[in-house]
Image (cartoon, coloured by chain):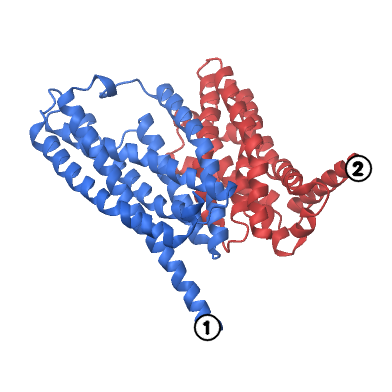
Chain colours: A blue, B red
């Protein structure tokens, strides 16, 4: 791991991964969209609206996955003081926030024809909304503190407190939801989904992951270059 | 050694409580906010007794939570700005002990008055008679979590200028479980259901906050003291 603490080393690794990630994205996105939008059947209950799911479900998965990336990076930054871990968290968080927003927006677009309302205080929607707020808090603290290193470590502490809280929040929201509402929600149960629908879903999930890798590496390189730039500037001023 | 440590702990605790209730302290401010903000709800939703009774537990809890929130940003900031936090960090208590003393002081000086005032507000909000006991119990069990989680947010934003808005963004999502279980308990006992389950869960949230809160706060303060 610490070999890649060297930014040049990391950049070289990133440049080696990027073309492959782009290729995977191109193939999976093309195939996945074709299968999802044209080749897969419409649902007998939901009609064409079921196709929203192919955009929505991978986004929701990635929203959770990216938070785990941020928390993992935060843990690495605090425990091992790995110099790139802070930057990894900073690079990943906005991507995760966008995935979370996408999951919420597509979810509510799907909810309008299905449940007759854009927003239902359903247990999952509510906990994803709280997750979105956690992302906002993490990003806000990066901006709120001027000193980069301190900002990063403060944000990391928050991310770790947040990750302890996510299961508690999830459980409490589910509990609250069953208390306040009868279960009147039509849901696709994960494993009982038909193969014609499962494949496009999995392929698109892979496409989302490739997209994440690409943007994440771009943002990491951007952060590294930005740091390099500010060091050079400081050197010029003092020299 | 132990006597001196508990002496420092108690001294710090007494000092913070006294400061909170001196002129310009947060104690009176939070309590007045609590009273005024709850009073606004009948104007907003109308004075029908049934409507007020239905929303009373939620309103009282949400406003208590906000009153606690607005008092948080001064929890460490004053001591950080005048340098006494550096001094305290070097005391035999250690930063975690300092955090524990100050969090306890925050709860006793700022939040406990809200708990004491809550039956009065329950009356104004037409809370049904069988809700009062659980309301008090839920506040006693749940509000320590507000102070403990809030302490983490206050410590993270201690060096941020006008950190109040940032603080609310950090802390409010983490308050969701406390709010849900507390209001769930009061609603249950108003509906003549045994509130033991939500109260137990509420206590669990508080205990978890007790485990994580002081250490995370101390780690966050250490960043700003470097």
The residue shown at (61%, 32%) is: B208
Mark carried by residue B1: 2
**Where's residue B213, x and y in %?**
64, 41
**Where's residue A180, x and y in %?**
41, 24
Answer whether residue A20 is visible to the viewer in this image.
Answer: yes
Q: Nearer the viewer, mark 1 or mark 2?
A: 1
Label 1, residues with CA under 10 Å away: few <14, some 14-19, many ≥20: few
The residue shown at (15%, 23%) is: A45
User: Camera-side residue: B153 or B50?
Assistant: B153
Q: Indicate the chain on which mark 2 is placed.
A: B
Q: Decide if residue A162 is on the left or right side of residue A29.
A: right
User: Camera-side residue: B118 or B173?
Assistant: B173
Q: Indicate the chain on which mark 1 is placed.
A: A
Mark carried by residue A237: 1
**Where's residue A33, x and y in %?**
15, 41
Position of A118 relative to A2 (above/below): above
Total labels drawn:
2
The residue shown at (45%, 24%) is: A175
**Where's residue A84, x and y in %?**
48, 55
In the picture, the quarter occupied by the C terminus of chain A is bottom right
Label 2, secondary structure: give it. Answer: loop
Label 1, secondary structure: give it. Answer: helix
Label 2, residues with CA under 10 Å away: few <14, some 14-19, many ≥20: few
């Amino acid at each position: 791991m610490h070999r890649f603490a060297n930014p040049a080393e990391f950049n070289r690794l990133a440049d080696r991964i990027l073309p492959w990630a782009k290729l995977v994205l191109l193939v999976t996105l093309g195939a996945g969209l074709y299968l999802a939008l044209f080749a897969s059947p419409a649902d007998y209950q939901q009609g064409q609206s079921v196709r929203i799911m192919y955009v929505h479900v991978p986004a929701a998965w990635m929203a959770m996955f990216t938070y785990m990336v941020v928390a993992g990076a935060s843990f690495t930054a605090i425990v091992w003081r790995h110099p790139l871990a802070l930057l990894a968290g900073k690079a990943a968080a906005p991507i995760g926030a966008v995935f979370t927003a996408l999951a919420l927006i597509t979810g509510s677009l799907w909810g309008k024809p299905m449940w007759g309302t854009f927003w239902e205080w359903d247990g999952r929607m509510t906990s994803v909304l709280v997750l979105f707020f956690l992302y906002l808090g993490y990003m806000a603290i990066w901006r709120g503190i001027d000193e980069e290193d301190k900002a990063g470590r403060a944000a990391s502490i928050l991310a770790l407190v947040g990750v302890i809280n996510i299961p508690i929040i999830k459980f409490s929201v589910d509990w609250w939801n069953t208390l306040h509402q009868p279960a009147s929600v039509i849901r696709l149960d994960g494993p009982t989904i038909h193969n014609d629908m499962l494949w496009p879903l999995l392929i698109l999930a892979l496409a989302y992951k490739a997209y994440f890798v690409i943007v994440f590496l771009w943002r990491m390189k951007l952060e590294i270059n930005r740091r390099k730039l500010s060091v050079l500037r400081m050197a010029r001023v003092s020299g | 050694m132990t006597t001196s440590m508990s002496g420092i702990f108690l001294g710090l605790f007494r000092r913070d409580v006294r400061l909170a209730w001196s002129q310009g302290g947060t104690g009176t401010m939070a309590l007045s906010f609590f009273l005024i903000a709850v009073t606004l709800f009948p104007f907003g939703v109308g004075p029908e007794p049934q409507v007020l009774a239905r929303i009373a537990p939620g309103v009282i809890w949400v406003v208590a939570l906000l009153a606690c929130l607005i008092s948080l940003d001064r929890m460490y900031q004053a001591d950080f700005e005048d340098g006494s936090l550096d001094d305290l960090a070097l005391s035999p208590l250690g930063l975690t002990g300092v955090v524990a003393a100050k969090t306890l002081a925050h709860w006793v000086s700022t939040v406990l008055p809200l708990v004491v005032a809550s039956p009065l507000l329950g009356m104004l909000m037409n809370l049904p008679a069988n809700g009062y006991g659980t309301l008090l119990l839920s506040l006693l069990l749940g509000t320590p979590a507000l102070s403990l989680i809030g302490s983490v947010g206050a410590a993270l934003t201690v060096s941020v200028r006008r950190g109040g808005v940032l603080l609310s963004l950090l802390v409010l999502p983490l308050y969701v479980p406390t709010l849900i279980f507390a209001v769930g308990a009061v609603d249950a006992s108003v509906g003549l259901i045994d509130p033991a389950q939500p109260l137990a869960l509420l206590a669990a949230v508080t205990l978890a906050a007790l485990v994580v809160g002081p250490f995370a706060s101390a780690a966050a303060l250490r960043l700003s003291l470097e």
